[in-house]
Amino acid sequence: MAEDNWSKGAAYVDGRFVPIAEAAIPITDWGYRRSDVTYDVVSVWGGGFFRLDDHIARFRNSMDALRLDPPEDDAAIRAVLTECVRRTGLREAYVAMDCLRGTPRPGEPRLPANCRNYLAAFAVPWVWLMSPELQARGAHLIIATTPRIAEDSVDPTVKNFHWGDLTRGLFEAEDRGADNCVLLDRDGFVTEGPGFNVFAVTDGEVATPDRGALEGITRLSVMELCGELEIPLAVRPVPAAELRDADEIFLATTAGGIMPASRIDGRIMGNDRPGPISVRLRETFWAKRAAGWHATPIDYGVSGTA
Amino acid sequence: MAEDNWSKGAAYVDGRFVPIAEAAIPITDWGYRRSDVTYDVVSVWGGGFFRLDDHIARFRNSMDALRLDPPEDDAAIRAVLTECVRRTGLREAYVAMDCLRGTPRPGEPRLPANCRNYLAAFAVPWVWLMSPELQARGAHLIIATTPRIAEDSVDPTVKNFHWGDLTRGLFEAEDRGADNCVLLDRDGFVTEGPGFNVFAVTDGEVATPDRGALEGITRLSVMELCGELEIPLAVRPVPAAELRDADEIFLATTAGGIMPASRIDGRIMGNDRPGPISVRLRETFWAKRAAGWHATPIDYGVSGTA
């Protein structure tokens, strides 16, 4: 296998390492055909994982919630992720881990409990959810008319691929000339957007939803930074009106860090650029990342797995 | 390629026919990673498709609703499905067609509108959603506590893989010693179960939900049969209490036809066996199928595609 095959990405599927171009899910797998799967994404920056243990712990909680039980324990998952990155040689990478339901064992009733669950993972070159140029300008957001899938139907704290509502929101955003969208719950409170948590800044206070959204690891980092920087933070229901009238809005995700917005539903916030609290949090976040904050360095020289 | 590879199933993925064991979806595809995909399933029985045009028309409507646009027109899809079955030689087959979002074209913003959509399809040996033995006994159903994903978040008439709520319902059923489940909407009305429509029979009238569920092709067949057999049929909201108190319940799906139940939430209906109206509909359905009702015969000798 030419080295170049690995530099584009390395994957692990059901026990076997393969170049990303060969990494695939059987078309009959319930992980695909029923979206019966959970996942997590961890970033590699400057040759180290960011908050690796937090991501693996959340992934394990998600698997437990869905009664998914792959053969790999947490130490093995850590080794698999490390080996994927090592094979690519990437210093900045987007690293995903999935646990799929699989298919029913032959001869057993076609029920989820009778499936052989398995792990898949991959590392690819870093992906920006929003480009650095867009982050510098500030995202133009809309509040989508499509409501978020309710949490009693699909638990948003268990990371999942049920993105039909989010995809509709993305088309709504594009139709309205915006970059991205935020979805509300049925009671009109802010939930999240496609792959990110949402923060509203009003009179110097940062507010983010306490429900209806993923408990993001970057969201957790924002909470820590607010503490360090003595910026007031409230984790509570956030009404749509609070977001529409906010002084600043920013988003948080693994694939982008802290991403400021500059417009909401066509309204210009501040001077049509990222606001001061958003910028301060973003700059502090990346400065601390560069200094090794919550980092797990990767040994690129040695394979930790067969 | 040995003939036996094809007898286990034949697939078509993004322009290429492959044995089912080789049919796979790239792990990075949004059809998997965002469940941004629609599908349909048509049955082959006695060497002919059942209601092929109805399935392809519904599939096209689903693709349009999600702004999915694969290169294949309806005639090409028909040819692909036929060729998949022809390669297997199967007289009874489960035939699926998927349209996936794909991934963003290189260099374009990572938005669904920038993806290259494509078709996948496969034919495999016939799959019973419920075994014939279970159908003869009558399924034991529960009404799940998990509510169905609301239709303003994900449209249930656009066939989709957002099964997180249905999978939870299946685990609930297993935990309560039942075979399968029915989900309610937030207002307490019956929607559907994992892959089937639901019918309640009370005082000789058959009732099935007018909303919150897939507009099933087998459901359509039930409607036609009720007309022919002069069985009163109502398509309207069906409260949970009506299902709990029904004289009979039966389910309808491509992968099983008309499937009677005998218990609901632990309550025995009739004599703990499929009820008379359910049995009459089921027997008429299969007798008409055997006689070529709505059938499109397959020419197994000639390849209609390259």
Image (spheres, coloured by chain):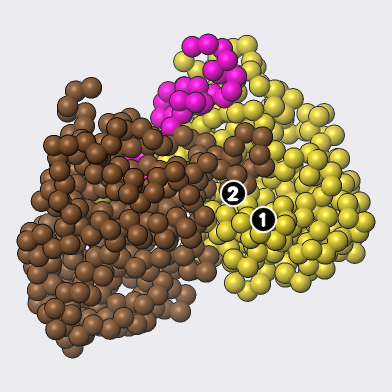
Chain colours: A yellow, B brown
* Residue A259 inside the magenta-drawn segment: no
Number of other residues with Cα within 10 Å of mark 2, as a class: few under 14, some 14 to 19, many 20 or more: some
Q: Which mark is residue A174?
A: 1
Q: Is label 2 in contact with label 1 (beta carbons under 8 Å)?
A: yes
Q: Is residue B190 left or right of residue A166?
A: left
Mark 1 is on which residue type? Glu
* Residue bounds of the magenta highlight: A1-30
Say which element carries label 1. helix
Which chain letter matches label 2? B
Is the same chain shared between marks 2 and 1?
no
Q: Is residue B298 visible?
A: yes
How many circles with numbers are drawn on the protein?
A: 2
Q: Residue at horizontal 18%, vertical 80%?
A: B227
Q: Is residue B240 visible?
A: no
Mark 2 is on which residue type? Ala
Q: Which residue is mark 2?
A: B113
Q: Which mark is residue A117?
A: none
Is the residue B169 above or below the residue B161 in the image?
Answer: below
The x and y percentages for residue A115 are 32, 43
The x and y percentages for residue B198 are 28, 71
Residue nearer the viewer, B54 or B289: B54
Say which element carries label 2. helix
Is the residue A239 above or below the residue B256 in the image?
Answer: below
Which chain letter matches label 1? A
Q: Is residue B62 left or right of residue A49?
A: left
**Quadrant of res A175:** bottom right
* Residue A29 inside the magenta-drawn segment: yes
Residue nearer the viewer, A285 or B158: B158
Q: Residue at horizontal 31%, vertical 81%?
A: B235
